Each structure stands twice: as C-alpha cells, then as structure tokens.
Amino acid sequence: MVDEQHRFGVKQRLILGQKGGGCDILIMTATPIPRTLAMTAYGDLKISQLDEKPAGRRDIKTASLQMEKMDEVIERLSKAIANGSRAYWICPLVEESDKLDAEAAEDRHRILEQLLPEANPVLAHGKMKSTERDIAMQAFQSGESQLLVATTVVEVGVDIPEAGIIIIENAERFGLAQLHQLRGRVGRSDIQSSCLLLYQTPLSYTAKSRLDIMRQTNDGFLIAEEDLRLRGPGEVLGQRQSGVPEFKLANLSSHADLLEIARKQSLMLVHEDPLLTSEKGKACRILIGLFEQDTAIRYLYSG
C-alpha cells in the first residue's frame, strides 16, 4: 500500500511494486497526479473513490489575494487569532534566496513574531533538528501557539483539528497536488475553515489556472483533471511524469470518456476472440502492427 502517492517518483513506485514479487498494489491519495489519471484511463489502475466527507466536516472556503495586500491579511489574521483561531502560514523557502522572489520561512517567522506577538508564532521546516521541530509542532497542537509558520514539511501527516486557517504565500510557485494537500491541513473538524492563496503578479496562464481551480472546488479528482490538462500525463511506458503524450488522434484530458469506452470494447473483443481471427480482430491486428512499427521507428530515432 502506497499512501500519499504523489510524493513518490516513478522509479520509487516501480521498486515498491516489485517487493515480494508480483504483489497487488493499493495506491491511496487525496490528489491523483496526472500520470495516475492516465494510468486509470489506460486500464492499468482501477479506481475506488471515497467522495463523502467524515460527519460534520464542511468545504474549505478558498480565496486568492495579491501579495501587495499583506498588511490587510495580517490585520484580519490578528482579529481571527483574537477570537481563538489557530492558523498555518506556509512559505515556499527556508532561507532567503537571491534567485527567487519569495519570503523565506525564517524571515516571515521573525516578521510575524513582531506583528503578532499575542499569537506566539512558532517555526517548522526541514532544516531544523527534529527535536526543535517537534517542540514547535507540540506548541501549536496544544494551543500554546496559535500560529505555525512552516514550509511544506506539514503537507502530510499533520492532523490538528483546531486549526481552521491556512495562508499559503507565493501560492503560484506550488503545484496543484501540493496546494490541495496543504489546504487539507485545515477543515479537519466541524468548524468552518478557510484557505488564502497569496500570489505575486504578474501570473502566468498556468499559475492563474491553478489558483482558479483551487477556488472553485475541494474535489481532489477535479483538481487532478485540471492538473492533467495543464501538465499532461507524461509517459505511461516511460519515466516522464508530465508533458503531452505523442498521440496522433486522442487527447487524454478531453477524450478520457472515449478511452474508457475503447478499453471496455477491447476487453470484450479479446474475451470473445482471443486470437483476433474475426473481421474486427483482423482490423485490430493491423492497428497493432502499425503501432508497433511506429513505436520501433521512434525508438530508433531517439537513439
């Protein structure tokens, strides 16, 4: 069983699948990555979807805001904390970088310590010693601190039902799977939770599309479908996890329903005519031959 499948690379999943020799594989994730959706479309994976929330949980309200309005965000956060709320503040970096125009988690923590001392902000990131990070997480979980400034180390495995606000800084720098997983740190109780996506302008088409779908839905499969449209499924027979496949006719994000029908028809044909001797079977053999020839030619040219 592989949980949080999107955090594993292709080679890692292949190695895990080979453990024990021919074992069955169960993949679990709140946000399928484009490659996973592609594999389901080709019939390599079967889907079992849990689309109901645990009792009492509500959809997370999601909004986006320009970074220029940071003062307004901090003012509203201060009021929420005064009313007893607990919040995550997520940054994409640990330390300041000259190459990326993004606030470092450590710098943001120092700023929020000055502006929101009543929240007793604590810091958690991957470069800290595990004991220091555990102390910070415990302070946030117990309520001693009402504000946790962190990197993506909190993306999975953190369950603090009392936390109802998450602010993601430079959200345009995150992928959809990460954004959805980070948003899932809140909304884990019956309190109304909210997610604020802070972004730098100007936004690219891809970044704008990501923020739009995050505002529109809490459904991980819909978000994954948009990710598939934006990034492509990659290579099903290779290791590339994104990019547009070299189909001559089909577009996986647009024709997924037709591919599902084609797969069912193919299974029926193989069941009824395993040697492909019927007229329909002969036509399929011709198509298979053309596919193999085309694949061989592309393989030779690729070296």
Image (spheres, grey):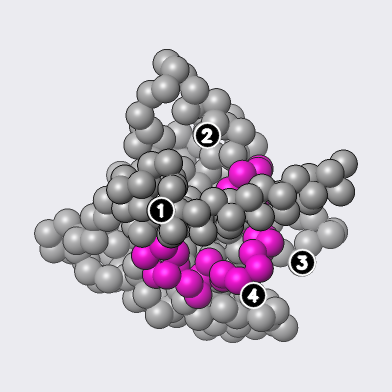
CA gap between label 1 and label 3 equals 63 Å
User: For the stretch drawn in magenta, what is the main secondary structure?
Assistant: loop
Query: Residue 25 location, x and y as percent?
Result: 38, 33
Work out whether residue 164 or residue 43 is closer to the camera in this orientation and state it. Answer: 43
Camera-nearest label, 3 or 4: 4
Camera-nearest label, 4 or 2: 2
Q: What residue does disc 1 label?
A: 278
Q: What residue does disc 3 label?
A: 101
CA gap between label 3 and label 4 equals 18 Å
Q: What residue does disc 4 label?
A: 206
CA gap between label 1 and label 4 equals 47 Å
Q: Quadrant of residue 208?
A: bottom right
Query: In terms of secondary structure, where does tag 2 sit?
Result: helix
Q: Circles 4 and 2: CB distance less than 8 Å?
A: no
Query: Residue 38 location, x and y as percent?
Result: 50, 56
Return the disc, 4 or 2, that comes first in the chain's sequence: 2
Return the disc, 1 or 4, that comes first in the chain's sequence: 4
* Magenta span of residues: 236-262
